[in-house]
Amino acid sequence: MTQMPQTDRPSGHARTLAVVNQKGGVGKTTTAINLGTALAAVGRSVLIVDLDPQGNASTGLGIDLNQRDRNTYHVLVGTVKGEEAIVATKIPRLDIMPSSVELSGSELELIELPTPQMRLKKALLALPAKYDYVLIDCPPSLNLVTVNAMAAADAVLVPLQCEFFALEGLSQLLKTIERVRVSLNPDLEIQGIVLTMFDRRNRLSEQVADDVRSHMGSKVYETVIPRNVRVSEAPSHGSPALLYDYRCAGSQAYIRLAGELLRRERRRAMAA
Ligand code: ADP
Ligand code: MG
């Protein structure tokens, strides 16, 4: 008897999602950390790949500087294997490949190396088949490092802050995704767009949310992440919001987002 796949990950290979938006401060890192934590909490094995030279995901997960000696910079330039740069976090089933400031100058080095856009993909493919999800936290630009993330990913997840220029930024990002599809990764999907730092007392927030939904339709997750002080306090404690204050509105929203993501993944796996 053939069985319907019950899992969101039937193939045995990690689903790799690039958390991307060329704007800084829109909630990429917060989303990578808290979504990663929520997925780990429901039993998935998760790796966060920190590709931002600022290392906010590494700091936000409590990774000391001395645990970042081997990091994504070394993995991209090829002096360290991906597996060797992974460290465990205090959250069960959640690991991280930390970053380093050296990443900020890496473009000039990368373009001298073979297949400069595919270096992360190669490194991730060589990892042991341990992870269900790999979440790549991208830097705030559409540079070669971000292109590496999009080339390595099965899908992108786009955090969008509900502010006036959100749609302009999004259309630029969609063009880049299309270019990556044509030249490097024809199967790259959009897992979804998540509205972040939503303030329901602000009419502009509502209006931007409506605009994004009317342009992007069902690509936009139903879950909206509210602006929430507890979420912004958590990183200074080296903890995801989900650990710092599980009950706060922001944590609860990220738990719902993880549920929505898993439902999309399951639907996708059934259709395949
Ligand atoms: P990015 O990675 O896109 O630069 P961050 O995730 O670092 O963005 O978020 C930018 C800032 O906003 C950080 O200080 C973060 O703590 C804060 N922040 C993110 N999401 C929320 C939220 N839902 N509520 C309040 N503050 C938030
Ligand atoms: Mg960030």
Image (cartoon, grey):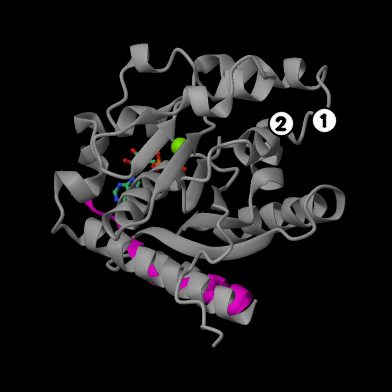
Residue 64: x and y, percent?
31, 18
Task: Name the mark on residue 33.
Answer: none
Question: Which residue is depicted at the point 64% across and 32% down?
Answer: 123
Figure check: 147 above or below 174: above
The CA distance from mark 1 to mark 2 is 7 Å
Count residues near mark 1 (Cα–Cα under 10 Å), then give few for <14, some for 14-19, many for 20+: few
Q: Nearer the viewer, residue 202 or 154?
A: 154
Q: Is residue 217 magenta?
A: yes
SS label for mark 1: loop
Q: Is residue 118 magenta?
A: no
Residue 247: x and y, percent?
13, 59
Ligand 1 picture quarter: top left
Figure check: 48 above or below 70: below
- Using the rendered image of the protein, determine whether residue 207 is visible from the camera's viewpoint: no
The image quadrant that residue 11 belongs to is bottom right
Label 1 belongs to which residue?
115
Report the span colored magenta: 212-228
The image quadrant that residue 222 belongs to is bottom left
Residue 10: x and y, percent?
54, 66
Residue 197: x and y, percent?
35, 56
Instruction: Say whether residue 26 is left or right of residue 219.
Output: left
Tell me the amino acid under the disc marked 2. Answer: Arg
Please say if the residues under marks 1 and 2 sit with CB atoms less than 8 Å apart: yes
Q: Quadrant of the N terminus?
A: bottom right
Label 2 belongs to which residue?
119
Question: Which residue is depicted at the point 50% across and 36% down?
Answer: 49
Question: Which residue is depicted at the point 50% across and 40% down?
Answer: 137
Q: Nearer the viewer, residue 169 or 86?
A: 86
Tell me the amino acid under the disc marked 1. Answer: Thr
